[in-house]
Amino acid sequence: MRSVLLVFYCFCLFSFNVSVAQVKWEKCGYDIVRSAMMVKNPDFEQRLEAQLNARQKMLAAKTTKTTVNINIPVVFHFILNQQQLHQVGDSSGIAQRIITQMQVLNEDYNRGNGDSSKIPGAFKSLYGNPNIKFGLAHTDPNGNSTDGWEIKTTTLQGFDVFANSGSAAKYDSSGGTNAWDVSSYLNIWVINMLEGTVQSGVIGLTVPPSFTDSSIYSNANPKVEMGVLIRYDAFGRRTNSSEYFYPGIDLGRTTTHEIGHYFNLFHPWGDDDDDDICRCPWPRFLNGSWQTGHDDGIADTPPEGCRHYGGYTFPVYDSCSPSYPGLLFMDYMEYVDDSSMSMFTNDQAYVMDNDISIGYTHSLISHPQLLDYPGTTNPNSDNIYSLYPNPAILGRTSVNFNLLPEGFESISVYNSFGQHIMDINTSNQLTTYYPIDLSGQKKGMYFVKLHFANRTDVRKLVVL
Ligand SMILES: [Zn+2]
């Protein structure tokens, strides 16, 4: 036995780098949230381990993946000071970043990202489709019309994400903004992030719904704190070279990554490298003792010891995946730059799909009416309708009336520059359903005018 151990020990020292020296950057605040939970819940590690074991069993027994075709209502809460607002282009720049961010989410969560062509052949078969769609909320919790975002101008420099996981951003009383009903809306706060009073390197932080479950954790986070924080200059996708973005982070992938945490995904290296020791998810002799690292509970992500930053070229190896094809550094749950990441795996997609089908996030797909503006400007009219889906899917949307409309004459569509795009004659059609096809048009904001005999309604439509 001793000789076997000795041989194994020598093999470890000879073959593997025991630790990888790198400047540590807390790019994502998952460790902050997890550490805070560990302090409050002494049995946190065991609970999390039980969750990972259950996940591995579920993946081992997985059958056909269900699909989710209903958009999740998203609301963005911007809380920025004048200088930060100006850096991102003020209200028009923010609208532009919101549109590009929604495009990125709907691409990345539906296998629609153009840079999937960069996925190496050896990993192509792992390219998963979560099939989750996101839409801007257009009815707020009071039933009023909303564009799906709110901007609060503050005199604060930002919010300390190391204090209570940045919760101050989530309450009016501490200079933030209260969440909208967390069971109906995915709340995303776009803020500046501080460590104490100095600038933090964190660019995203998520409190997943599972961390607010008091039936699992005796000191869970308050439910109203579930949601995502994104640093303001890591939000949206660059459309021209002069725009202000965090270096290397300009393709909207921080939000893709953080929403992965919201759906209960973990970092592929298992979040056990805080002391800069790269642990594989099996026993190894490291720094004088036998140690076992954590896994992400995802069967098809290769084992990985430590986080990776910056840009990478395939293949990349570490001591846990030392042979071809090596590490899946292009996974959205990695720490690499936006341009280096391009995929979720099939099993990550399955876990997220399972969460939204029967898990914590299921309630988000139970309120599709929140995706549309409130039905009509005249609640006494019989002409109650919805514009759905909005954003349009592949350029297609429709006007749906509850009853046959009266005096409905036509639909006209204009682009954001006020240019006329199309007319649809709707008079005397004896139908409640009026499709609108903008599939040949550019992505962006459009205005749909509905002409009635006694009024004209205008609705904003986003084409993604
Ligand atoms: Zn993360």
Image: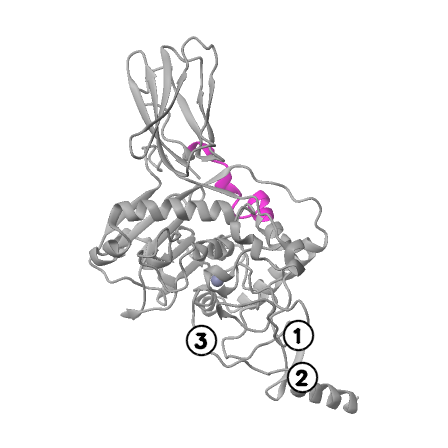
Earlier-in-chain disc, 2 versus 1: 2
Q: Foreground residue, 441 or 161?
A: 441
In what quadrant of the picture does the C terminus appear?
A: top left
Q: Foreground residue, 131 or 79?
A: 131
Instruction: Name the residue that disc number 3 marks.
Output: 24
Return the x and y of residue 142 as percentages of the image width and height: 33, 35
Type of the residue with mark 1 = Pro
Q: Is residue 35 above or below residue 217?
A: below
Q: Is residue 81 left or right of residue 389?
A: left
Return the x and y of residue 458 as percentages of the image width and height: 31, 26
Q: Is residue 321 left or right of residue 379?
A: right
Asked if residue 361 can be seen in this view, the reply is yes
Q: Which residues, given as a range, are shown in magenta?
A: 353-369
Type of the residue with mark 2 = Ser
Q: Give residue 322's mark.
A: 1
Look at the numbered disc 1 and give the secondary structure of its residue: loop
**Residue 450 falls in image quadrant:** top left
Look at the numbered disc 3 and give the secondary structure of its residue: loop
Q: Give residue 15's mark.
A: 2
Return the x and y of residue 297 as percentages of the image width and height: 62, 61
- The answer to whether marks 3 and 2 mark residues whose Cβ atoms lie closer than 8 Å is no
Earlier-in-chain disc, 3 versus 1: 3
- The answer to whether marks 2 and 1 mark residues whose Cβ atoms lie closer than 8 Å is yes
Q: Is residue 378 above or below residue 6?
A: above
Residue 363 part of the magenta-drawn span: yes
